Each structure stands twice: as C-alpha cells, then as structure tokens.
Amino acid sequence: MFAVALQARGRYAPERGTAQAWLLTIAHNLLVDSVRRGRVEDTARRRLGLGVLTLTDDDLAAVDVLVDEQRGVTPASHALRSIPPQQSAAVTAHVLEEEPYEVIAERLSCSTSVVRQRVSRGLRAMRQIIEEKP
C-alpha cells in the first residue's frame, strides 16, 4: 500500500482533503481491487509469515466509513446530497443557515407553504436515507 502511495505522491492534492483521507482512499481502492480479483497481495503476507487475509463485507464497510469520516462525509451530508435539489436548498437555507421561511420563499419566488413543504419532505427523505444505512 505504501509503495502505491509513494508512486502516486505527485497526485496528492491537499485542497481535496487530508493526507490521511488520501491514504485511506488508496487503501480502500487496493482492498476493493483485491477482493474483485479474488486474491490478496501475497508477497508482503508471505514475508511476514501471515495467513490468508479474508475480508468480509463488514470489513469493507468499515473502511468505507473511515474514508467518509476523513473526507468529512457524514450520514447527514450524504443524505442532504441525495435528496432532490429543491428540497436540499430549502433544508440548507432553513435548517443550516437558519433563514425564516418567508425570506427563503422570496428568494426562491414561491410561497412560504411551498418552502415549508420542501423542508418537511426533505427532512423526511433524509431521515429515511440515514435509517437505511447499515
């Protein structure tokens, strides 16, 4: 893994995330590639005298969680990006930016009841997305 990271060091871009997140992404990609091919890297394992490493779906899911955490991806931010754009904009404006419904409605050129509906539906959809995650 570190050899791959060393070879790819020129592609590291600090503005896209931390070095730790970059390394976790490399490790994640290597694990996924290894599982897809139905094998693990044997060279290092043999040198260390270790047995065959068996990765489960839970192991891969745990790596995904670590990568997401390092990238700043939370279940809520993922859910917010997953709902329709109009709902996302309304939820962001009202919940995160604490704007009143009236201000949002004026900016979006719609009624306050439409904004309330978008926020309500958006939050409900986000809750469902978050609850579906294992």
Image (tube, rainbow, N blue to C red):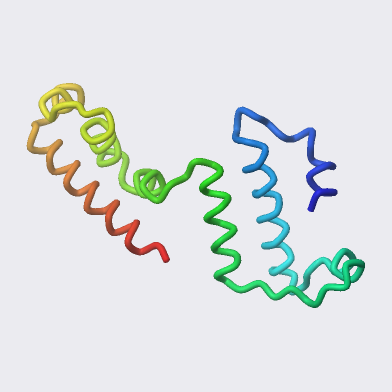
Q: Is residue 122 left or right of residue 51?
A: left
Q: Residue at x 66, y 56 (%)?
A: 28
Given residues 81 and 108, the one toward you in this image is 81
Q: Position of residue 72 (x, y in %)?
A: 49, 41
Q: Is residue 129 left or right of residue 102?
A: right
Number of labels in the image equals: 0
Q: Residue at x 84, y 42 (%)?
A: 7
Q: Position of residue 97 (x, y in %)?
A: 26, 28
- Which quadrant is the C terminus positioned in? bottom left
Given residues 122 and 69, the one toward you in this image is 69
Q: Position of residue 77 (x, y in %)?
A: 39, 44
Q: Position of residue 19 (x, y in %)?
A: 67, 37
Q: Residue at x 54, y 42 (%)?
A: 71
Up-down relation of residue 82 to residue 111 (above or below): below
Displayed quadrant of residue 9: top right
Q: Residue at x 88, y 73 (%)?
A: 49
